[in-house]
């Protein structure tokens, strides 16, 4: 991916309803379950650094990123974000038990060996450490954005929980989110190939008025999803702990 592409993605992430809502959700969960600001934190799959910025804004003081792309690493460095190492989630260049908190948000769906990826997160966590995972949900929602993002699959709750359980995690919290827009997004992904066959990304189709409306819906969604535990959603989240003494 070229530097200009990362710059464009950063601009979109700053205001796009989905990115803003997701950051709101992460902020609340981290404040509740992982509030130690001196903890060693790893963000896997940093890309343009959206999680690194969030962690910095929340005053986490010992943050490291990991990404397979040298361009992404250079981009984050030039933005003054925490340091990023080069590597893959399936073979991370860190010793066992290196971190107290690992974020692997919308990363596991990008690799063929998804069990190996979740196992690696467990390996680099200290006993008692916390992992935050998110993945895209429901194969029926497969669409343009999955293609341009090079996803391998989407998950149901039972599928992803099986990976987490096999890695030895204890699930602390789990739920689908972006559930209020499940139906509209399913329909939009059926229609986009018909009405906008040349679209290169769903982000292109987002205009300020629509973004404002969807922003409000998404804020309501992430506030209520942990409470109502919807049976379906566009994304699935798992907060898990590695057994053992903290």
Image (cartoon, grey):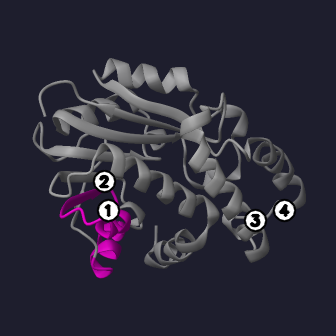
Residue 55's tag is 1
In this image, 144 relative to 222: left or right? Answer: right
Q: Which of marks 4 and 2 is in front?
A: 2
- Measure the alpha-carbon separation of dots 2 and 3: 30 Å
The residue beneath circle 2 is 43
Q: Which of marks 4 and 1 is in front?
A: 1
Residue 12 seen in the figure: yes
Reading the chain from its start, which is encountered first: label 4 or label 2? 2
Residue 192 to residue 135: above or below: below
Q: Is mark 3 on a helix, strand or loop?
A: helix
Reading the chain from its start, which is encountered first: label 3 or label 1? 1
List x then y, in percent, for residue 108: 43, 40
Q: What element carries label 1?
A: helix
Magenta residues, as a range?
A: 52-80
Which residue is rendered at x = 18% and y = 32% of the image? 128
The residue beneath circle 3 is 213
- Measure the alpha-carbon separation of dots 3 and 1: 27 Å
- Measure the alpha-carbon separation of dots 3 and 4: 21 Å
């Amino acid at each position: 991916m070229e530097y200009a592409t990362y710059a464009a993605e950063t601009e979109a992430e700053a205001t796009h309803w989905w990115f803003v809502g997701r950051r709101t959700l992460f902020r609340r969960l981290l404040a509740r379950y992982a509030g130690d600001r001196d903890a060693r934190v790893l963000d896997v799959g940093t890309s343009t650094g959206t999680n690194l910025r969030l962690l910095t804004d929340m005053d986490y003081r010992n943050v490291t990123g990991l990404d397979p792309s040298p361009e992404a690493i250079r981009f984050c460095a030039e933005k003054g974000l925490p340091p990023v190492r080069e590597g893959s989630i399936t073979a991370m260049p860190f010793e066992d038990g290196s971190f107290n908190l690992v974020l692997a948000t919308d990363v596991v769906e990008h690799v063929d060996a998804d069990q190996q990826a979740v196992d690696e997160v467990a390996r680099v966590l200290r006993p008692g450490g916390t992992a935050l995972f998110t993945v895209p949900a429901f194969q029926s929602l497969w669409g343009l954005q999955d293609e341009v993002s090079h996803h391998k699959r989407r998950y149901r709750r039972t599928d992803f929980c099986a990976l987490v359980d096999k890695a030895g995690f204890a699930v602390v919290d789990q739920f689908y989110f972006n559930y209020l827009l499940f139906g509209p997004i399913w329909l939009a992904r059926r229609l986009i190939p018909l009405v906008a066959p040349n679209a290169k990304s769903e982000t292109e189709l987002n205009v300020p008025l629509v973004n404002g409306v969807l922003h409000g819906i998404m804020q309501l969604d992430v506030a209520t999803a942990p409470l109502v535990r919807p049976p379906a959603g566009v994304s699935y989240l798992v907060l898990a702990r590695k057994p053992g003494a903290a």
